[in-house]
Amino acid sequence: MDDSIPISALQHYVFCPRQCAYIHIERVWQDNYLTALGNQLHQRVHSHEAETRVNLRTERSVQVQSQSLGIHGQLDLLEIRDDPLCLTPVEYKRGKPKVSDCDRVQLCAQVLCLEDMRDVSIKRAALWYWQVRKREWIAIDQALRRQTQSIISATRALLAAGELPAAGYSSACKACSLFDLCMPKQNDHSQDYVKQLFCE
């Protein structure tokens, strides 16, 4: 489908709609120390090698898509158990579990694609964080599914509009590789707006 959007755009949108627009509309990207570490981790993960142990098969760099939702992407790792069939996507991340839902939405979108492609039901998936070196199990429940579908719609609307949203500064901005380009502190006029309201 021509207007299919990458799953990574959903993760970027939840982190920051402005970052999402820079990457997926303006086609701008800059690496920083954190993204370079992430790239290093994913080079190891994306070996394309499959392994089989007893009744567990693992596949790496698995391409997925959902025609009905209009999304596509790549799984870092897919664990496949037989009898009964059980599919478990595992997404690798550089840091540690986040407060925001950006990683959980990305993982849920991968699950929705797998369910669409393989006609299965997946109840849970995992995020593996390099900093803590263990899995965080994520329940793929109705609330997360609804949230993910809402983010898909919001991301599609942002990309269709083709405009860069206004900046707003938060503590998350410090980790963004586009900080110097975005200049969120200079572009954030929210404090001026609040002062103006009280002056009036």
Image (cartoon, rainbow, N blue to C red):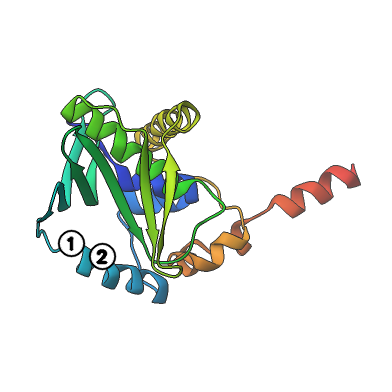
In the picture of the structure, the residue carrying the numbered disc 1 is 46
Vertical relation: 140 (above or below) 79: above
Q: Is residue 169 left or right of residue 23?
A: right
Residue 192, given in percent of the width and then of the height, sits at: 76, 53
- Answer yes or no: do the residues labelled 2 and 1 have beta carbons within 8 Å? yes
For the C terminus, the image quarter is top right
Q: Nearer the viewer, residue 135 or 36?
A: 135
* Element class at badge 2: helix
In the picture of the structure, the residue carrying the numbered disc 2 is 42
Q: Give, as a three-letter code, the residue at label 2.
A: His
Residue 189, given in percent of the width and then of the height, sits at: 68, 53
Vertical relation: 122 (above or below) 75: above
Residue 4, given in percent of the width and then of the height, sits at: 23, 34
Residue 25, given in percent of the width and then of the height, sits at: 33, 47
Residue 16 visible in rendering: no
Q: Nearer the viewer, residue 77 or 146?
A: 77
For the N terminus, the image quarter is top left
Q: Count residues near mark 2 (Cα–Cα under 10 Å), then give few for <14, some for 14-19, many for 20+.
A: some
* Element class at badge 1: loop
Q: Nearer the viewer, residue 51 or 191?
A: 51
Residue at image point 82% right, 47% down: 196
